[in-house]
Image (cartoon, rainbow, N blue to C red):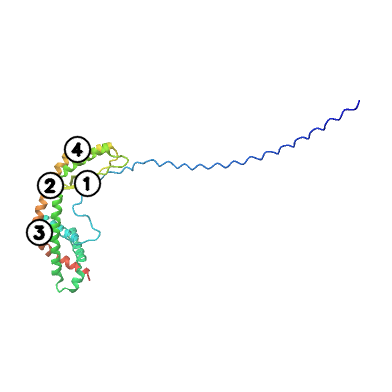
Amino acid sequence: APAKKAAKPAKKAAPAKKAAKPAKKAAPAKKAAPTPPPPPPTRRPARRAATTRRAPTGPPPKAVPDQSTVARAVASLALDKVKQEGQLSVRQQEQLRRAIALGAHVLGWGAMVASSDDPLTEAVKDLNRLGKRGHTILGKELAEEYASKKIEITQLEKIQKQLAKAAVKHDWNLPFDIDYRHTARAGSDGYVTKIVTPVVTTANEAQDVIDLIEKRKEAWNKLREHMLVALKAQQKVLAGMKDSIPGFIDSAKTLVLEVFDTLH
């Protein structure tokens, strides 16, 4: 029998598939935005010490002395001389010499002394004019202090009401600024007005100040009444002092001549 045909050759193997392309690199992750730092904690203001000071008895000091400064100084020393039965202490004599020297500077006595035939007479006229002006200034200051002293207790009661309101409604992250005035003794028989600036940073501290004022108000009121009498007496002395100013200035001629010697 004829031989069988050979088997068909085997099919060629399919070529291997190309390897898959490498995966794309992942995009770098975006950096997260930095977290802002937390706000600093709110700090209460540092505790301040309570302060007490005397109320000024005259106008605030001025950077540049003017005629009113000299006038007040001359009149004050003239008033002291009346109170002291016509005598000034050595210290007060020096204060008067300095006041006259300051007047010489303010009024330009240097040129006047160089050109005048009678500079002493002109200087005395200047000082008399300043003395009268100073008398008016002192009278006004006493009247203002007397008026303020009359309503002192009423003002203290207003402060108490303000503190009571602040204890309920104030934002205690901030201190409550306030001050009050009361009468106090000065020496054995004198009186002054003191200004107190308390530390008030909590509602409890506000109540403490209310209680303190309430506790001492009666005693302060008695001192206030005594000071009113003293102020009235000062006003009476001041009213009678005006006519003595020319004599006071005449008695200071020696000091005026001493000041003249420093102007050359």
Label for residue 242? 3
Considering every residue shown, the one lying at the far top of the view is 1
Can residue 88 be seen in this snapshot? no
**Rendered image quadrant of residue 98:** bottom left
Secondary structure of the residue carrying numbered label 3: helix
Residue at 21% from the left image edge and 63% from the top image edge:
102
Secondary structure of the residue carrying numbered label 2: helix
Residue that badge 1 annotates: 195
In 3D space, how far apart are the residues under numbered discs 3 and 4 (Cα atoms)?
A: 42 Å
* Marked residue nearer the N-terminal end (2 or 4): 4
Q: How crowded is the residue under tag 1: few (<14 C-alpha within 10 Å), some, or many (20+)?
A: some
* Marked residue nearer the N-terminal end (2 or 3): 2
Residue at 16% from the left image edge and 40% from the top image edge:
219
* Amino acid at dot 1: Ile
Residue that badge 2 annotates: 228
Tag 2 and tag 3, C-beta contact below 8 Å = no
* Amino acid at dot 2: Leu
Q: Position of residue 214 (x, y in %)?
A: 19, 37
The N terminus - image quarter:
top right
Residue at 23% from the left image edge and 48% from the top image edge:
53
